[in-house]
């Protein structure tokens, strides 16, 4: 298919090929993206299609090239805030499937197509007793979006289990394999949010799992929950289930209260700068940063201290049980959400002199 695309581009045959395969892909015009986001805020896309086979993806790329319009990929829409109409083609990814690529006595490599639910991939692993990804169970969204921000939860990040990914260049249709060193994974960050932003469609991700895993239990209230249930040595599947229950009890369900999870990243500053701020705010919470000599400050604590926890401004506000989560209490517009983002950022800056950056992709 890639060779076919290369020839198509070289000889300018795309409009013609596009016409031949058009029957497969249904491209709609002027579609409101609101229902496709967990915040239930959205504007219109000039063109919109759903791809459930890779051939359809190539046709969508050809369509956008022909019309000279940009492409935006949408997975589960759980990490986006759409603020303006999108003038191009939105591709909703529904490429499904999980398979074992390789197995040895100690490890298993599992590949999922990128439109698969991330938690379906994790469940595939935990039900076989293969460990490494269980702390990331129940992070919403698709497999293809997981590397974009290097998803993380309960002391584990995607990078800890990542083996490789297969990406398609959205301009040339060419395939490229990314290994871990190509991805520049950081805290809620990767090369796909920076240098290669909007350049690739992640088509599949392979994770490497351990058959003798070391469980990560020292995070959040995992130990408390184990004690409460009287479990001394949890199995991988038991741990995944505990993580699901803890998440369910703490986070608002987007189907009931539209939200996009943690809206802001935890700011990271040097240990010296932290010492200075701590003089004015001795109760300030902190934990080790991702770089040597750096400290992370929980944005939730900053937002709460700045007075935003549970406070509503019209139909938007920061969730009453977790100040990091921006909630749409019903009918919020993009303008109201953007104003709330700015209000919270300004409030935190005014009180602490610290800048908090959105984790959610504001588009
Ligand atoms: C209740 C709740 C809890 C959450 N908890 C966590 C958490 O614990 N940890 C965490 O890290 N995140 C968390 N999130 C955020 C979210 O789940 C992740 O960021 C997830 O990876 C987003 O997946 P998605 O498919 O919904 O991506 P989308 O929102 O559809 O897309 C996100 C970004 O990735 C791009 N993208 C998506 N798919 C592809 C692809 N195939 N190729 C190229 N680019 C692509 C999009 O263009 C967009 O820029 C939470 C969200 C919610 C609503």
Image (cartoon, helix red, strand yellow):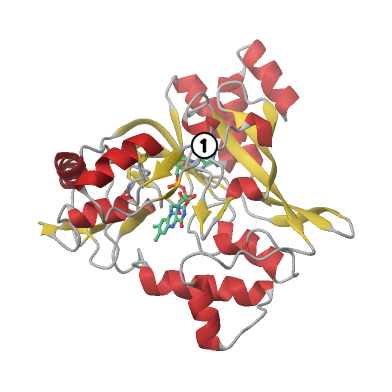
Q: Residues within 10 Å of mark 1 (few under 14, many from 20)?
A: few
Disc 1, ligand 1: is the CB inside 8 Å? no
Residue 264: x %, y % from top left: 33, 46
Q: Is residue 261 left or right of residue 221?
A: left
Q: Residue furthest left?
A: 314
Q: Look at the picture and state if 222 lies above or below 194.
A: below
Q: Nearer the viewer, residue 352 or 254?
A: 352
Query: Where is the C terminus found, in terms of image quarters?
Result: top left
Left-right relation of 266 to 186: left
| The one of 212 and 363 positioned closer to us in this rendering | 212
Picture quarter containing residue 107? bottom right
Residue 45: image location, x then y, percent = 34, 37
Instruction: Please name the residue shown 48% across and 76% down the image.
Output: 245
Position of 329 compared to 358: left or right?
left
- Which residue lies at the image location 57% right of the left edge and 40% below the top edge? 23
- Return the residue at label 1: 292
> Quarter of the image holding residue 156?
bottom right
Which image quarter holds the N terminus?
Answer: top right
């Amino acid at each position: 298919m890639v060779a076919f695309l290369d020839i198509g581009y070289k000889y300018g045959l795309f409009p013609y090929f596009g016409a031949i395969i058009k029957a497969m892909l249904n491209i709609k015009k002027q579609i409101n993206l609101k229902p496709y986001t967990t915040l239930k805020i959205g504007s219109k896309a000039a063109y919109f299609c759903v791809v459930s086979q890779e051939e359809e993806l190539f046709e969508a790329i050809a369509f956008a090239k022909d019309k000279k319009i940009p492409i935006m990929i949408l997975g589960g829409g759980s990490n986006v805030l759409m603020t303006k109409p999108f003038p191009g083609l939105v591709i909703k990814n529904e490429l499904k499937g999980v398979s074992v690529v390789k197995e040895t006595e100690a490890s298993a490599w599992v590949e999922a197509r990128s439109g698969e639910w991330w938690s379906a991939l994790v469940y595939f692993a935990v039900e076989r007793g293969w460990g490494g990804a269980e702390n990331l169970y129940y992070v919403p969204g698709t497999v293809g979006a997981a590397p974009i921000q290097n998803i993380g939860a309960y002391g584990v990040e995607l990078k800890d289990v990542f083996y490789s990914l297969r990406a398609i260049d959205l301009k040339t249709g060419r395939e490229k394999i990314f290994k871990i060193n190509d991805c520049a994974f950081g805290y809620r960050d990767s090369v796909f949010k920076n240098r290669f932003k909007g350049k690739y469609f992640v088509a599949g991700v392979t994770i490497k799992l351990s058959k003798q895993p070391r469980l990560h239990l020292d995070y959040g209230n995992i130990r408390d929950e184990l004690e409460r249930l009287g479990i001394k040595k949890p199995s991988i599947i038991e741990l995944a289930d505990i993580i699901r229950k803890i998440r369910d009890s703490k986070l608002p369900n987007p189907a009931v209260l539209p939200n996009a999870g943690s809206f802001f990243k935890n700011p990271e500053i040097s240990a010296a700068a932290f010492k200075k701020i701590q003089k004015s705010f001795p109760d300030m919470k902190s934990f080790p940063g991702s770089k040597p000599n750096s400290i992370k400050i929980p944005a939730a604590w900053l937002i709460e201290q700045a007075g935003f926890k549970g406070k509503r401004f019209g139909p938007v506000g920061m969730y009453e049980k977790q100040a990091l989560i921006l909630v749409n209490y019903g009918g919020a517009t993009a303008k109201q959400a953007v104003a709330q983002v700015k209000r919270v950022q300004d409030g935190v800056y005014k009180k602490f002199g610290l800048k908090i950056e959105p984790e959610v992709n504001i588009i």
